[in-house]
Amino acid sequence: MMSRTNYVERDIEKEIIYNLNGIYQPHNLIVSAEGPNNEFDMEAVRRVVEGVLLPAMAI
């Protein structure tokens, strides 16, 4: 989808709105992205879960 100009423009607009409302990557916003060959990048999701979510949930 990132090869579509309209999609990218809307994605940027949404991130600006999130930021204006105190929502930032990776603090409280998780964004998934396409990997090589336009496939879902599950490895990137794993890194976010292990590097951000699990430590944030630790007591």
Image: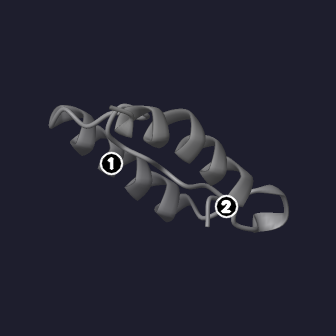
Instruction: For label 1, count other residues whose C-alpha is less than 10 Å away and answer few (under 14), some (14-19) or many (20+).
Output: few
Q: Secondary structure at mark 2?
A: loop
**58 left or right of 37 in image:** left
Residue drawn at the location 39% of the way across and 34% of the way down: 58
The residue pinned by badge 2 equals: 3
Residue drawn at the location 48% of the way across and 63% of the way down: 6
**55 left or right of 32 in image:** left
- 33 or 16: nearer the viewer: 33
**13 left or right of 25 in image:** left
**58 left or right of 1 in image:** left
The residue pinned by badge 1 equals: 13
Q: Quadrant of residue 36?
A: bottom right
Q: Secondary structure at mark 1?
A: helix
- Provide residue 35's location: percent of width, then percent of height: 75, 56
Q: Amino acid at mark 1?
A: Glu
- 38 or 46: nearer the viewer: 46
Residue drawn at the location 34% of the way across and 43% of the way down: 15
- Provide residue 28's location: percent of width, then percent of height: 31, 39
Using the image, determine if residue 10 lies above or below residue 26.
below
- Provide residue 42's location: percent of width, then percent of height: 69, 60
